[in-house]
Amino acid sequence: MFLEGVKEACTGAPDTPMVLLGNFAVEDEWARGEVGLPALGSRAAAAVAHRMDEFALLLGGPGDHVVLKSAPDPGFLDQLRGLGLDLPQVLVPEVTEPGRSVSEDVLTSPALLATLRELGAAGARLWPHGMSALEERICARTGLASALPGAAVAKAVNGKIYSRRLADELGIRQVRGWECETVAQFAAAAGEAAAVLAAGGRIGVKDAYGVSGKGIAVVDDPARLDRLVTMVTRRAERSGDERVALVVEEWAAKETDLTCHFTLARDGSVRFDFVKEALIAQGVSVGHRMPARLTPAHLDTVEECAHALGKRLAADGYHGVVGVDAMIEQHGGLLPVVEINARNNMATYQTRLQERFVPEGAVALARQYRLRLCRPLAFDELRERLDGLLLAPGRDRGSGLLVDGFATVNAAHGAHAPGEPFTGRLHALVIGGSQAEVEEWDAAVVARLGAFGARGGTA
């Protein structure tokens, strides 16, 4: 089983109690002090991203604990328990703010810190989405040992510059690109990339620690590339800091995005977990299709790369879950390493549900539905709207919709004025015996959610 395998790989025992923490904004912590592209964002977007912490509820078992920014909707818990899922115990900080990560909430909550101290004394380990200085502070203040290596190692192996250099070192095919750690290197890379633009191609300029569409500029105009160079140069002149942390890459003409997943043990051994098709919209992951439609040769290559990457990551001090972004090009070529994510990822949180509810030979679509709301929505109201479509007790090997993320539906409500419309994200698995059946269920869900202004996550 996936969970027991991760526990054994990271702690040496398959029954080690874990304290799970869905600190999905960990890249923001890794990016502190790094110089990249100008950051743009909104309060609502940040609030929704922080409520993705609820996915950690699905990863732990009955002997584990999970820290969430707020208690889950009772109806959502009823759905999960009604399907026979044994869930971890939920802990909630007594001090929370929508714009803060769950880790920051923990550190300002004395009662919760005291509870975590007791769990640490009993042998529990902290398993965060990814390890940063914030989670190290939690460990220091509670005595909880971490299941993952420290923040310095985690940051070092998660940068896009590291990914490119590691792929080059291992001889793994990747798109043409340039790693830039100074303004001069960025200007030189832009000069070489101009030839790609002149030939009709596109260029991606990426922050070393950007994630989910943030910190990336896709450029098809030489003048825009020049403006980026000018902006970065002028900023360096004002600050006196010539450092940057950027990657410039030729933009691949892709057919399919992939998420490859493996678990790296403390002893350096690699367990290849799975590969799924990733659904990407405007640079943001909005779901997965499973199983991935790969040729045997592509699958063999993906597994070989996982073992090679794992060996090298272990040498650099990392152990734990690893997700690797990959892609199949339009002409059928495989790019096995687009980016290394040495942390949990969205596919990680689907594992227990996949093991339980997606039998061999079935097809599942993990996706999000965007709802336009004017007030908070209770899960029981949603369940009534989707009556007959939700996976029900006794149908755990059948077809239907399984909601796996509900906190993000109402997360943006507090970031808007009372009565002002806001957009919520409903996360779910659509399960069927074939791709055609999944598409039928998905269309039925969209139709039912129409009253809420539902839109598909890939729109």
Image (cartoon, helix red, strand yellow):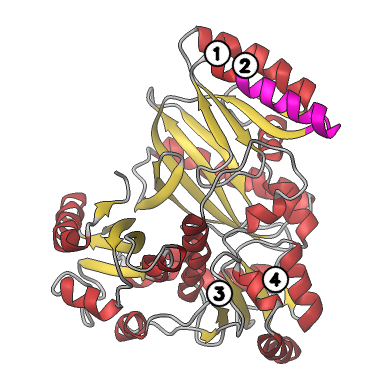
Q: Earlier in the sequence, mark 3 or mark 4?
A: 3
Do the residues under discs 1 and 2 have CB atoms within 8 angstroms?
yes
Classify mark 3: helix, strand or loop.
Answer: helix
For discs 2 and 3, the disc positioned in front in the rendered view = 2
Using the image, determine if residue 9 lies above or below residue 207: below
**Magenta residues, start to end:** 226-243
Residue type highlighted by circle 1: Pro
Residue type highlighted by circle 3: Glu
Q: List the residue tagged with mark 4.
A: 147
For discs 4 and 2, the disc positioned in front in the rendered view = 2
For discs 1 and 3, the disc positioned in front in the rendered view = 1
Q: List the residue tagged with mark 1.
A: 222
Q: List the residue tagged with mark 3.
A: 4
Question: Residue 379: x, y in percent?
Answer: 29, 77
Camera-nearest residue between 17 and 207 = 207
394 on left or right of 223: left
Q: Which mark is residue 226?
A: 2
Classify mark 4: helix, strand or loop.
Answer: loop
Total residue callouts: 4
Do the residues under discs 1 and 3 have CB atoms within 8 angstroms?
no
- State the CA–CA distance, disc 1 to disc 2: 6 Å
Classify mark 1: helix, strand or loop.
Answer: helix
